[in-house]
Image (tube, grey):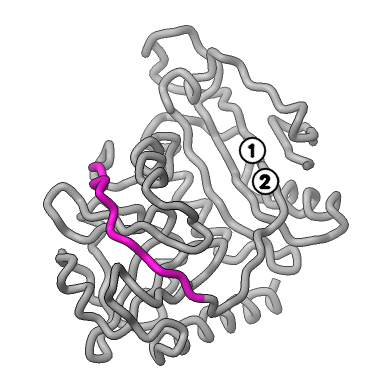
Amino acid sequence: MWCWMNGEYVHSEDLRISPFDHGFLYGLGFFETFRTYDGYVFLWEDHCKRLQRALDDYHIVLPYSFDELLAVIRELDNRCNGEDGYFRLNVSAGVHDIGLKPTSYTEPTVIVFRKPLPTMVRGEEKSAVWLNTERNSPEQSIRHKSHHYANNVIARFEVPSLAELEGFFVNGDGFVAEGITSNIFWVTDGKVYTPSIETGILPGITRGQVMQQITVIEGFYTREQLEQADECFITTSIQELIPIRSLQGKNFLGNNGPVYKALHEQYVKRINDAKGRS
């Protein structure tokens, strides 16, 4: 598998980082995951803005422009016979002594990982379960997509297969939060709902795009309120909008849900329109 690290194209088995990287020592690193569509990265600017907010908050100086990194992504696809790929753009703080001495990180470790896209069938349903693990609170007022992933890992142990199931978190106050790797939406009497960012969830990129397509009511909701819904779906940048068929005995309309179908069709149209303008 081809990757790219600090200006060099590298095979994945040859990637090396220092044990003194503060991304390893202290979990100080951030990342974005996305895919290409015929070489095009949908909502690239949104991913860049979210990553830049995290880097700014933690005084990490990115030594490459986002245009340079976008060129890297295209080259990695080219090196894989032009096939679309699953990408992770990762920025960790870089090498420093043990201890929290630095007041800024000017030489981070920057890696673009690429792997084959997982098999995806648009409209393929998943089921969901409530997790016993509570969603932890973010380090700041807004959650960054960071190396601090232990909460998600503990939750993942509860789910036999993320390919077939998504686990739904509630937060410490008992309010519906998000999935292990997704944001959650549901539809009751034609109205679309999603948890507020203030529940501690990640402001997902696909989540934001859905909220531009239709009026969505954000708030603090209980499990029981979600279970009363007619439709439920989750969103990720890799798999787009995924219909949920059931949640621990509660059945939804799944991929027959009219709101889900309309929103996913609009989402795909936006991808195709954006590709055509690129």
> Which corner quadrant holds the C terminus?
bottom right
- Check if residue 209 falls in the magenta segment: no
The answer to which of marks 2 and 1 sits earlier in the sequence is 1
Residue at image coords 51%, 12%: 96
From the viewer's perspective, is residue 184 above or below residue 217?
above
Amino acid at dot 1:
Tyr
38 is higher (above) or lower (below) than 273? above
Magenta stretch secondary structure, dominant? loop
Of 163 and 194, nearer the camera is 163
Residue 257: name its quadrant.
Answer: bottom left
Asked whether residue 249 is in view, the answer is: yes
Picture layout, residue 230 above or below residue 119: below
The residue tagged 1 is 64
- Residue 74 in the image, given as x and y percentages of width and height: 76, 54
Q: In which image quadrant can residue 239 be found?
A: bottom right
Does the residue at mark 2 contact the one at mark 1 (Cβ under 8 Å)? yes
Give the quarter of the image for residue 25.
top left
Q: Quadrant of the image for the N terminus? A: top right
Q: Residue 98, percent across and down? A: 44, 8
Residue 197 on image: x %, y %: 26, 58
Instruction: Assess disc 1: are there few (<14), some (14-19) or many (≥20) residues with their C-alpha within 10 Å of its C-alpha.
Output: few
Residue marked by disc 2: 69
At label 2, counting other C-alpha atoms closer than 10 Å, the crowd grade (few under 14, some 14-19, many 20 or more) is some
**Residue that appears at 63% across and 21% down:** 17
Question: From mark 2 to mark 1, how far is it between C-alphas?
Answer: 7 Å
- Please report the bounds of the magenta region as a residue range: 125-137
For the point 64% across and 36% down, the residue is: 111
x 16%, y 73%: residue: 225
